[in-house]
Image: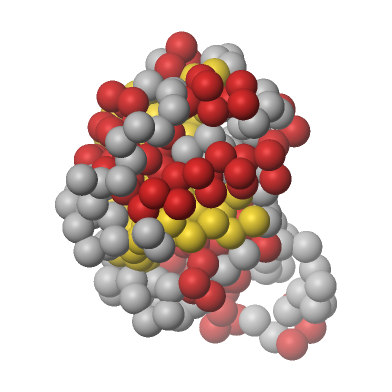
Amino acid sequence: MSGLEGLPPLREVIRRYGLSAKKSLGQNFLLDLNLTGRIARSAGPLDGVDVVEIGPGPGGLTRALLAQGARRVIAIERDNRAIAALEEIARRVHGRLEIVAGNALDIDPRRFLGDASARVIANLPYNIASALLVSWLTVEPWPPWYDRLVLMFQREVAERIVAGPGNKAYGRLSILAGWRSEARILFDVSRTAFVPPPKVTSSVVSLTPRRDPLSCDRHALERVTQCAFGQRRKMLRQSLKPLASDPQMLLDAARIDPTARAQDIPVAGFVALARALSSSITPDSVPARGTARPRL
């Protein structure tokens, strides 16, 4: 027995705790238990696995993760209205659900994991989904504290994550995801599966960390991709001018055709450019401390 038997239906939980979805929190609740079960199963066997879930809301996916055998679910929830609903689940599973109140952007899950590896499985709040993914893909040291990410995104964002060279969705997020992970879309989720329904289709994406990604400085990679895709219609010999007075030197070092455009260059090419940039950086070219980090 999982201890979850007899829990009230999710719609009753929403009504009881006044959990109307808030747009300001990026909330869209999944109430279809078949679908939450499918998401949990898509993350692979969970027996003995610690799971980090972001934005559990009324706990639909949380229930599925526990039912699939997760050793422990660390549920990070910003909406105080949902805490009582999650505590109702926690009382039944005897220590297998740990509720962390707060903004996931400000919380390092490693505080709650000790030395254990974990898996992140979540229907992410859409307004912070990309920022969270970037934070997980740029964490140090690498390999990271998680063995897999299984996350819900808007379909448009999912396509950007998995896109390759030549694809119109290929961009800075594609480079970062492809550099440090193997990413693929598992399946789409209709907008009608959510309460309230969003305006777009969603997709569940799996990202498995690469144990030995190509070596380069992350900040240099961010700078290169920011310039290259900031003017993606231009040839690289033009778009990279903010990085160097003579971009040709960077391109020659990376063995990249200067007439190529950003969307044509594979991840390995951008890594080579980042290495070339790192080797050419002088103290005067280093951004001042506190400089805003570019968004992907």
> Which of the image's four quarters has the N terminus?
top left
Q: Residue at x 61, y 21 (%)?
A: 15
The image shows a total of numbered marks equal to 0
Q: Is 48 placed left or right of 93 in the picture?
A: left
Q: Give the vertical position of 62 relative to 203 (above or below).
A: below
Q: Residue at x 22, y 40 (%)?
A: 41
Q: Is 33 placed left or right of 160 in the picture?
A: left
Q: Is 258 placed left or right of 105 in the picture?
A: left
Residue 147 occupies quadrant: bottom left
Q: Can residue 274 be seen in this view?
A: no
Residue 102 occupies quadrant: bottom right
Q: Is residue 4 visible?
A: yes
Residue 5 occupies quadrant: top left
Q: Give the vertical position of 41 relative to 284 (above or below).
A: above
Where residue 31 appears, as percent x and y from the top left, is 44, 23
Residue nearest the observer in this picture, 133 or 224: 133
Residue nearest the observer in this picture, 264 or 98: 98
Q: Is 269 placed left or right of 287 in the picture?
A: left
Where residue 112 appears, as percent x and y from the top left, is 49, 72
Residue nearest the observer in this picture, 189 or 28: 28
Residue nearest the observer in this picture, 259 or 50: 50
Q: Which residue is drawn at 75% across and 33% down?
A: 24
Where residue 2 appears, as percent x and y from the top left, is 25, 46
